[in-house]
Image (cartoon, helix red, strand yellow):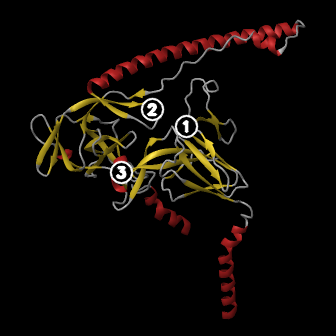
Amino acid sequence: MKRFAFFLSILPLLFSPLSGAAAVPELKEQLVYTLNLFNGRGYTQSFIPRYEDTIYLLADEDNAVSPRLTQVYFWDISRRYVAAFNLLNEEGEGTLEVLQGEKVIKTVEKEENVLFYSEGFLGEVSQMVRGEEARRIQTKYETVMRDYYDQATAYFKATEKRKRKLESYAAELARRKEGGERLTPEQVEAGLPPAPKPPETPRYAVSPMRKEYILHLPPGAYEIQLRAKDGTILEESKKKVEAFSRRRQGGVGYEVIPENRWTVKENCDDPSKVIYAVGENILFLRPFIQDEYNELYYKKLLDPQNEGSRERWIWVHNKPIEDLVIALSPEGEPPEKIKRLSYFVKQTKSSQLGYVILPYREEDFPGSSPTFAGYKLVFSANRGSYEFCLEKSNGGILEGSQRKILRVKKERAHLLYFVSIFPLLIGTAIFLQRKKSTS
């Protein structure tokens, strides 16, 4: 009976609006800004809801903003505001005004633009192209893609045709075998129909054409507002703008990719930091020229709903270093020179869904581009530490590129369990002693 009464007492809670499963987000119509902001290497796309009052962007760069009427809701799971552009997405029309103080210092009209991805859509580098040049690049890209799709269609048709020929050839071989004919593997292979060559995927990509307000501002604090065609100011269009720049530039940072944990990448941006490698290990390094930015400003640039500290600074990778070699020096030995190579990450067919990192050659992976390019560092089990740096063609060292690697030994690692359990044993002994004395 008590259990039944308890069930009745919690029944309203299970079906109340406060329970996560039953909660339905409340949609609110808002004028928001969609953002297409330069982040130092490429462009980051996001939106700023009504509840954020400041747009943070890099000074002296092309940044695009677009006021849009949409529906916004708060997603409890991620604790973020989300825009339902699929339900409502109306562009705000008018002239964008840029103010400092109470004075309008600039008016901006919408301008056509595209993003040019030199490494394809999955690459990390992009640039904004505006006006007539944007239309020219877009037209050329459409032609390239039409040709590619035509070639892809022809390739798939040729593949199906070859498949039918293989089936006929296999049946012919079976008949010849039944008739007592014996063929060598070379003879069988000579009769195979040739495989069609897949088309080469375009190396670059271009985004669809957009029409947005382009802001190119020197460092400083501003405000923006949208003046409608009837001369009125849309109240919800008012936002503060913080155009900021880097504090330091030209440093050298590394992206560190462990071979056995491809998806867990880390950065080593400070020359004083040490990279740790466990046992025999292989690391792939991707060096970058980096700049230093205010943490709050930069995180807000990536997403206005991010958080950060105004007192902290972070390094940001912006330009990959491609034309140097890495000099890897085991302790007490001369350095080994390592070149930058391209690699392809291939998923294995086992039930564990792992992967392997293989040297990229176009003939081994037809129709596919390399996954990444970097420097492969192999560490021996009998070495304690290494040092490496980026070496120029004249033998000089790129300033700020030096790092140290320490190899962590796994021998007798089980002793760590005894160290961690030691305080628990002491606490248990004290508890038993006190219990004995009080009894």
Density class for disc 2 (Cα within 10 Å; few <14, some 14-19, many ≥20) is some
In percent of width and height, residue 84 lies at 34, 40
The answer, for residue 357, to whether it is visible in the render is yes
Q: Which residue is mark 2?
A: 121
In percent of width and height, residue 48 lies at 30, 46
Check if mark 2's residue and mark 3's residue have beta carbons within 8 Å: no
Q: Is residue 233 left or right of residue 196?
A: left
In percent of width and height, residue 330 lies at 66, 53
Q: Earlier in the sequence, mark 1 or mark 3?
A: 3
Q: Is residue 201 left or right of residue 331?
A: left
State the residue in front, 319 or 186: 319
Q: Which mark is residue 298?
A: 3
Q: Which residue is mark 1?
A: 373
For the point 35% across and 23% down, the residue is 137
> CA separation, marks 2 and 1?
16 Å
In percent of width and height, residue 110 lies at 22, 32
Q: Earlier in the sequence, mark 2 or mark 3?
A: 2
Residue 357 vs 273, above or below: the answer is: above
The answer, for residue 259, to whether it is visible in the render is no
The quadrant where residue 387 appears: bottom right
Q: What secondary structure is found at the residue carrying circle 2?
A: loop
The quadrant where residue 157 appears: top right
